[in-house]
Amino acid sequence: MSARFRPGERVAVRRADPPGHMRTPWYCRGKTGVVERLCGEFGNPEALAYGLSGDPVRPLYRVRFSQRALWPDYRGRTEDTVEIEIYEHWLEPAQERPNV
Amino acid sequence: MSEPHNHGDHDHDHDHGHAHEHSPRSFQPDLEDQPQSDYQYLEIAIRELLTEKGLITPEGMRRAMEAMDARGTHLGAAMVARAWVDPAYKKRLLADGSAAARELGIEVGPMHLLVVENTPQVHNMIVCTLCSCYPRMVLGIPPLWYKSREYRSRAVREPRAVLAEFGTTLPEGVEVRVHDSTADMRYLVLPMRPAGTDGLSEAALAGLVTRDSMIGVALPEAPRKAAAE
Amino acid sequence: MRSHHDMGGQPAGPVDTAEHHNALWEKRVDAMMMLLSNGKPPLFTVDQVRRAIEGLPPDAYDRMAYYERWLFAIATVMKEKGVLTQDEIDERVKTVRARTGAA
């Protein structure tokens, strides 16, 4: 499996807004997190949703986000996190500066 | 009052409950199966049409319903209790939840189960903000609140406030880690073994593991003061 | 543009933590979903059902119960695949209503 990202690597979720079905939640678009693990390779739900094959399978990662990065006014602990499964085609290497 | 049903191309008189369409144990004709809403009529219509077209069968429906009825908290709890008493099983459980479930004879099908461990430093909580993905093969059908707008919206945004609504407060210094089940994985929380449970049998330990502790909105029950089983 | 179903982080009220039992008809919708999406070959995937649900207008999405949305989606996908037509469904609903003595 040729996965582009490795656990521990900082990644950003693309700020894309395509039409149709997708499984990348709005609240993490444009946010930066850290790859927690590679889950495996899976078909693309954006195509499966329309009865298409979903091929080629692509890497699916779990990405850990700091709550403070997701919500500017987050009131819980600084250490609180959210982990989200995100397909590789939604991720790009993070910029050098931390936390957009 | 007879249950509405389709006789297809045969005709016969009978007044027994239709066991081929549902579990007889759960059938309460007066309460349950007189259609009331438009959607209940639609369900009957769709089921009959799909049956006539050979896409589903009454036997298949019965088996699917019985199989889902048979799934519940006890399956996940068995996995948790085994992990509490057997460190090697716990390691396998955390590495591959589906394989670990199969080890205990639990049929999980194609589900990819990922088990996340609560520690003194980290408390895990599961949500599916986009719909209601849930580890059905090891916990059964999710509770209504799990599918609600309120839970799906707020669990990722203010998990501690949501936990408080379940009566759950965490000790100081614990990180809350929310898992949004957005894609192909399904999640189960491995709660921490409660204090005061040394010497309890595996079955007794499983009895302390609640559904809500495996979703992560609650902690497992404390052992009763009565003698261990 | 955020879709209505994509609700992570949106404001909402307190969680109603009460237990609810699923009615028999809801369990049948669940079973149909399992049979149709797990068959060999599957008639559709869960992605198609999700997409159909996500296409509901926001007020319908909010007003409909969970299994009502699933049933709507199963009907939608079956129609898309040409397995069922709306005429067939309407006819059968009429027949079922007449059979059960409802208006």
Image (cartoon, grey):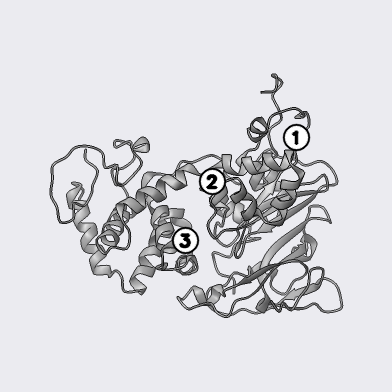
Res B194 label: 1
For mark 1, name the chain.
B
- In the picture provided, is C66 more to the left or to the right than A74? left
Res B143 label: 2
The kind of residue tagged 3 is: Tyr
Q: Specify the quadrant that holds the N terminus of chain A.
A: bottom right
Residue lying at 57% horizontally and 75% vertically, measured from the top left:
A44
Q: Nearer the viewer, mark 3 or mark 2?
A: 2
Residue C34, picture quadrant: bottom left
User: Tag 1, which secondary structure?
Assistant: loop
Relative depth, front residue between B162 and B66 = B66
Where B77 sits versus B228, above or below? below
- In the picture provided, is B113 more to the left or to the right than A78? left
Relative depth, front residue between C11 and B98 = B98
Q: Specify the quadrant that holds the C terminus of chain A.
A: bottom right
Q: Nearer the viewer, mark 1 or mark 2?
A: 1
- Residue B20 is situated, as x and y percent measured from the top left of the image, at 29, 46
Residue lying at 53% horizontally and 73% vertically, measured from the top left:
A21
Look at the image and tell me whether residue B217 can be seen: yes
Badge 3: few (under 14), some or many (20 or more) residues near its Cα, within 10 Å? some
